[in-house]
Image: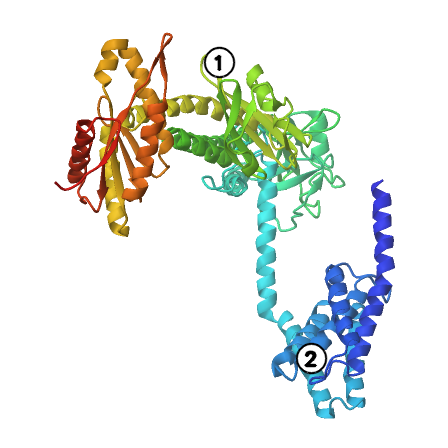
């Protein structure tokens, strides 16, 4: 199937090549005929051709960069001709307005000559010469303009060629190449020594270049330290054993070849490798076991791959480094061990003391690598744990529920790369989306869904993360039947569980890429969810405490302390913008008699009913408070006397029409309202309160169930 698609694509490209070539030829012909000379009034046909050139160029521009084909009209040649025509159209059109437009064809020609092979650029160069010569032959330019244009193109191309061949350019290229090669070599060494992270455990799954330097760079640094230790150990062994060379072979991670990890030698005919596994002493050690001692060495035997010539080798001693995790497994189940080898020109046999010394050196080299690996693992785990601690510290540093939810989103994004995050909170028989970020989040935020609906509902019911494989088959009913989550390949819903096991909500994360939510990342999300559940409970408690500190516990209105603070703020605001502010003091008529007759529980019901009407009458910018036992206060921001009177009259009327029931007996109540207006009646809070209280006294005195505005006596 894939081959058929590739074949079809190639046929489509070949079919489009000739139409593109024809469009390019038409553009060159238009320039040649003088259709785009400065000062001309361009015909509809000329303008249409320019649009066609632009559209075709945009569709085929990527063909300008690619592999060079062998035939004369490769895939890149047609777009090049098209580009040539387009450049000359803009050059001829703009030359009268901007003489520097000559830079456009000059740079184009320089790019052609300096970067493309002759076979590919030939067609464009021929077209350029023909167009310029045709314009001269047709009388559209003189011979000096022709010579100047072609000379500018030639000098630009020559200049770029000289720069590309200059010492400065090649020195910079060589430096960059050497740096890239060294980095690649160090990377390979670190990988062979097992110093790069490979295990997909919980800590390795954590992202976070913000806190931890590049682990691959750390691996390269560790490899450099190990190589320095190897060099010292090998030189020490060469001196101790009076050897010609001491060399260390290390297998690559795929087990395909040995690489010369280090060598201390007196000889110059060193073959740097790599070497085929199983050749020479490597094959003998793989078959024979821990060590190989050979003395004298036959002249016809080529046992040492690190020498270009085998001459002057009298004795060879090689040992395998102790078995470790660095060894590479072959398909047959065998292990590919690192090998330490020494040789000398004298053919005398190796003594037991020399063999023991080499074995100790091999053991020391293996311990060096193991110690460095352990340090690397510790450093990676330390960095990963540091990221977890920072994320959780930020989460634990907030108390308000909204802050907890925002800190949770930030922690998830910090530790797990996902494209969508939502937090749903359980509220009686439904779950409500309190926070949502990602594609489609604006349609989801604040919505409530029945507790039995969607994947979130099932996860809350089972109290277990869903789906089990963390995969998403879009579209999917994650929150409810009327909302489908689309465009994601990875998905996980994690219940936010309390310690006793009940869930306060659910954390939903999704990613567009597949296999993002690995088991390790799922473990991270469960860890976060456990902390978030506790913080949500604490956040709700914090909200309740704040509410109790600022509101009246019976009516839910502001308490007097909060009201006094809000009164000050509103007065300052209205003073700055020179607006009005009205204060209503309301008192329930004969409230003591209601308590004495029907009891205090019924009196509390009356207070709650009056508070409900006052809350409904107030706007979001107004303040409503329980000012005393049966006394209420209402601050109307931006309201003058006329508007405030309407509000007060409506409140008085609605309360008068209320009917409470004490058993079967209906009970009606009334209120009296006193009103003061700023700035007409004063701009000081104490003055306004005093005058509103005086107006309330007058309302009581005049028979109650009325609204009285303060007046100067």
Residue 461 at x, y percent in the picture? 57, 16
Asked where in the image residue 273 lies, by quadrant, the reply is top right
How far from the left and from the top, in percent, is residue 506? 52, 24
Relative depth, front residue between 454 and 705: 705
- Horizontal relation, residue 438 to residue 48: left or right: left
Is the residue marked by circle 2 packed among few (<14), some (14-19), or many (20+) residues within 10 Å?
A: some
Q: Is residue 212 above or below residue 80?
A: above
Q: Nearer the viewer, residue 301 or 667?
A: 667
Instruction: Give the percent coordinates (x, y) of residue 24.
Output: 80, 70
Pointer 2: what residue?
A: 93
Quarter location, residue 291? top right
In the picture, the quarter occupied by the N terminus is top right
> Quick check: 46 above or below 185?
below
From mark 1 to mark 2, how far is it between C-alphas? 77 Å
- Give the residue at x 74% y 28%: 331
Along the line of sight, which residue is nearer the eye, 518 or 597? 597
| Total labels drawn | 2
| Residue name at image x 21 percent, y 16 percent | 592
Per the image, label 2 sits on a secondary structure element best described as helix
Query: Which x, y percent locates residue 597?
Result: 25, 9
**Disc 1 designates what residue?**
501
Is residue 509 visible to the viewer in this orientation of the structure?
yes
Disc marking residue 196: none
Residue farthest to the left, as pictured: 713
Residue at left offset 31%, top offset 29%: 652
Residue furthest top as drawn:
663
The C terminus sits in image quarter: top left
């Amino acid at each position: 199937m894939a081959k058929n698609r590739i074949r079809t694509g190639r046929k489509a490209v070949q079919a489009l090549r000739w139409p593109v070539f024809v469009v390019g030829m038409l553009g060159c012909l238009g320039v040649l005929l003088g259709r785009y000379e400065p000062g001309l009034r361009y015909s509809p046909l000329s303008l249409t051709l320019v649009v066609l050139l632009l559209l075709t160029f945009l569709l085929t521009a990527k063909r300008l960069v690619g592999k060079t084909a062998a035939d004369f009209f490769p895939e890149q040649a047609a777009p090049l001709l098209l580009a040539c025509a387009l450049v000359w159209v803009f050059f001829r059109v703009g030359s009268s307005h901007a003489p520097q437009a000559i830079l456009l064809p000059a740079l184009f020609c320089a790019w052609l000559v300096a970067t493309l092979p002759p076979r590919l650029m030939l067609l464009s160069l021929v077209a350029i010469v023909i167009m310029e010569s045709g314009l001269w032959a047709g009388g559209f330019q003189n011979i000096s303009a022709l010579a100047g244009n072609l000379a500018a193109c030639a000098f630009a191309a020559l200049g770029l060629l000289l720069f590309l061949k200059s010492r400065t350019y090649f020195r910079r290229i060589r430096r960059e190449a050497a740096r890239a090669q060294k980095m690649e070599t160090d990377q390979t060494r670190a990988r062979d020594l097992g110093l790069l992270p490979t295990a997909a455990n919980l800590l390795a799954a954590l992202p976070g270049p913000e806190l931890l330097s590049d682990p691959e760079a750390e691996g390269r640094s560790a490899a450099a330290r190990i190589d320095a230790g190897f060099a010292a150990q090998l030189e020490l062994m060469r001196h101790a054993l009076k050897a010609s060379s001491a060399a260390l072979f290390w297998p690559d991670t795929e087990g395909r070849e040995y690489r010369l990890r280090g060598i201390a030698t007196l000889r110059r005919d060193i073959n740097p490798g790599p070497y085929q596994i199983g050749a020479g002493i490597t094959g003998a050690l793989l078959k024979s076991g821990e060590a190989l001692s050979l003395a004298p060495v036959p002249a016809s035997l080529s046992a040492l791959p690190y020498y270009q010539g085998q001459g002057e080798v009298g004795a060879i001693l090689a040992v395998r480094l102790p078995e470790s995790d660095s060894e590479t497994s072959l398909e047959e189940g065998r292990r590919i061990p690192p090998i330490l080898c020494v040789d000398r020109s004298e053919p005398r046999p190796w003594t037991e003391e020399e063999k023991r010394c080499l074995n100790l050196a091999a053991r020391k080299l293996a311990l060096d690598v193991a110690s460095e690996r352990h340090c690397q693992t510790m450093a990676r785990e330390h960095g990963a744990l540091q990221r977890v601690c920072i994320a959780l510290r930020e989460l634990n540093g907030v108390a308000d529920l909204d802050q907890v939810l925002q800190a949770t989103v930030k922690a998830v994004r910090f530790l797990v790369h996902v494209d969508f995050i939502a937090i749903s909170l359980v509220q009686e028989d439904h779950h409500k989306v309190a926070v949502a970020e990602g594609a489609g989040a604006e349609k989801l935020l604040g919505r409530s869904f029945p507790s039995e609906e969607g994947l979130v509902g099932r996860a809350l019911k089972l109290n277990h993360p869903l789906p089990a494989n963390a995969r998403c088959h879009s579209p999917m009913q994650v929150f409810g039947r009327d909302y489908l989550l689309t465009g994601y390949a990875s998905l996980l819903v994690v219940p936010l569980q309390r310690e006793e096991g009940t869930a306060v909500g659910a954390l939903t994360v999704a990613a567009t890429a597949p296999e993002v939510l690995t088991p390790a990342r799922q473990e991270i999300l469960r860890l976060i969810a456990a902390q978030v559940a506790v913080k949500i409970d604490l956040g709700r408690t914090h909200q309740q405490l704040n509410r109790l500190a600022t509101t009246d516990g019976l009516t839910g209105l502001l308490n007097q302390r909060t009201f006094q603070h809000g009164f000050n703020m509103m007065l300052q605001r209205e003073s700055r913008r020179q607006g009005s502010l009205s204060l209503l003091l309301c008192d329930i008529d004969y409230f003591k008699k209601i308590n004495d007759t029907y009891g205090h529980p019924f009196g509390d019901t009356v207070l709650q009913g009056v508070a409900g009407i006052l809350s409904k009458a107030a706007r979001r910018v107004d303040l409503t408070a329980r000012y005393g036992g049966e006394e209420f206060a209402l601050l109307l921001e931006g309201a003058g006397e006329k508007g405030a009177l309407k509000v007060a009259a409506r409140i008085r009327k609605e309360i008068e029409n209320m009917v409470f029931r004490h058993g079967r007996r209906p009970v009606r109540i009334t209120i009296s309202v006193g009103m003061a207006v700023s700035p007409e009646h004063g701009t000081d809070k104490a003055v306004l309160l005093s005058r509103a209280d005086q107006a309330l006294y007058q309302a009581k005195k005049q028979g109650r169930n009325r609204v009285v505005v303060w007046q100067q006596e």
